[in-house]
Image: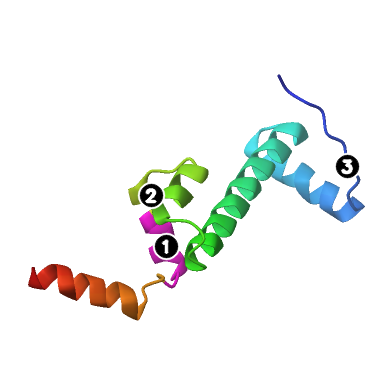
């Protein structure tokens, strides 16, 4: 069920939103909903990738949190040049596994 949220913005921002709405052939509310959806999705991806980089969650968990496939999340990692947490201990485990 939709919820109404109200907020105040500066006049310049309101004019810009109106310009975008006119150019896109939408009303102001539709433009704002799209902006909010895009911004919240971006925020969630950024936060999830920070948690991944800090080894708090796996990449798979980050993908699930963001409602993305693992491959989509891998693309986000590539595009953002995220440091993949891989320790010396991880390397040792991988080398032991290769030698078995």
The secondary element bearing badge 1 is classed as helix
Name the residue carrying label 2. 72
Q: Is residue 52 above or below residue 90?
A: above
Q: Is residue 97 above or below residue 62?
A: below
User: Which of the two labelled residues, at mark 1 and mark 3, occupies the earlier sequence position?
Assistant: 3
> Is residue 66 in view from this perspective?
no
Is 60 left or right of 3, judged from the image as shown? Answer: left
Q: Nearer the viewer, residue 92 or 84?
A: 92
Disc ID at residue 7:
3
The magenta stretch spans residue 65: no
Give the main secondary structure of the magenta stretch: helix
Highlighted magenta segment, given as a residue range: 74-83
Q: Identify residue for label 1.
A: 77
Q: Are marks 2 and 1 in contact (CB under 8 Å)?
A: no
Q: Residues within 10 Å of mark 3 (few under 14, many from 20)?
A: few
How far is disc 2 from disc 1 in space, using C-alphas?
9 Å
Q: Residue at x 12, y 70 (%)?
A: 98
């Amino acid at each position: 069920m939709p919820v109404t949220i109200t907020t105040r913005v500066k006049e310049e921002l309101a004019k810009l939103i109106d310009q975008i709405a006119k150019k896109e052939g939408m009303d102001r509310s539709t433009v704002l909903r799209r902006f909010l959806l895009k911004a919240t999705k971006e925020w969630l991806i950024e936060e999830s990738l920070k948690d991944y980089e800090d080894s708090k969650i796996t990449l798979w968990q980050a993908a699930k949190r963001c409602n993305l496939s693992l491959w989509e999340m891998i693309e986000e990692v590539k595009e953002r040049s995220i440091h993949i947490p891989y320790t010396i201990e991880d390397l040792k485990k991988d080398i032991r596994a290769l030698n078995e």
